[in-house]
Image (tube, grey):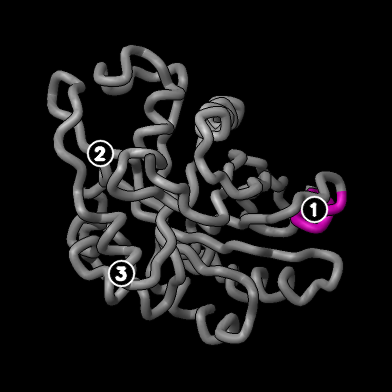
Amino acid sequence: MTVQETYAQLNPPRFWLNIQHDAFYTQHNLSMRSFVLSVTRNRNVTIDYISSPEVAFLQNIAPSFQRSATNLVFRFLGQNDMEPSTNQTYGSLLKNITFIKTFASGIIVPKSYIWPVDKDLYLLPSTSLVLDAHKEGLEVFASDFYNDVPFSFNYSYDPVAEYLQFIDNGEFSVDGMISDFPITPSAAIGELYASGCNVAMLQWTFWSSQVMEQVETILVVQIWHIQKQFKMV
């Protein structure tokens, strides 16, 4: 399925494209920039978010979206992984949030960037990442949430408790969460609503990883996007 076919079939309130390997396609004389621009010019498709783990790709397309409602999001991979266009690790890039703001309006980070764990899977103190990013005007989306992979023992094997830790901890709230199990964050939001928190209306956002028009469109995950920060209680 193409991006257009996926959009027509699902008709999502919001649509997200993740361009994962621009450098690979460039090596094969294929332009993901041209592809993305052609999709966004299609009146029948509205792209709300475009993300990529490659700095050069986002810098290349950023001028085309300066007056657009489409948000560009930089995706951080492992802290020791190398970002191909800058030859810096993602951990190093994290230290320069101001630089990220020059070409993106948001970031995707693995949840361990926010709440790290020790070797025994117990939570360490949270980092200042969310607060620092918000000061720069960047949205923060946390990723790597799973129900079937071991996570911190602090949550007593309750994945709902883990989601709540990222949105209702009394200090900060992420702007969205990326999960392979969207029903679980839905349950977490339901708990907040039941507790009387001022929870804004939520919308499903589909993150579609599209490579080229001739290749199958992959629906990777669904996201609960929090339009406004929660009232901390």
- Distance (Cα) linking label 3 and label 2: 19 Å
Q: Which residue is mark 3?
A: 135
**Mark 2: secondary structure:** loop
Q: Earlier in the sequence, mark 1 or mark 2?
A: 1
Residue at (13%, 24%) from the top-left corner?
119
Queried whether the magenta region covers residue 10, the answer comes back as no
Give the dominant element type of the magenta stretch: helix, strand or loop.
helix
Residue pictured at 61% horizontal, 26% vertical: 183
- The residue where tag 2 is placed is 115
Q: Is residue 32 left or right of residue 23?
A: right
User: Position of 71 compared to 135: left or right?
Assistant: right
Residue at image point 23% right, 49% down: 79
Mark 1 / mark 3, whichever is N-terminal: 1
- Which residue in the rendered view is the most extreme toward the top? 157
Q: Where is mark 1, residue-wise?
A: 7
Q: Is residue 50 above or below residue 12?
A: below
Above or below residue 157? Residue 169 is below
* Residue 4 counted in the magenta span: yes
Instruction: Please identify, in this view, whether the residue under mark 1 or under mark 2 is nearer the observer.
Output: 2
- Please say if the residues under marks 3 and 2 sit with CB atoms less than 8 Å apart: no
The amino acid at mark 1 is: Tyr
State the separation of the CA atoms marked 1 and 2: 34 Å
Q: Is residue 35 left or right of residue 114?
A: right
Query: How many residues crowd mark 3 within 10 Å: few (<14), some (14–19), many (20+)?
Result: few
Q: Earlier in the sequence, mark 3 or mark 2?
A: 2
Asked if 129 appears above or below 41 in the picture, the reply is above
The magenta segment: 2-8
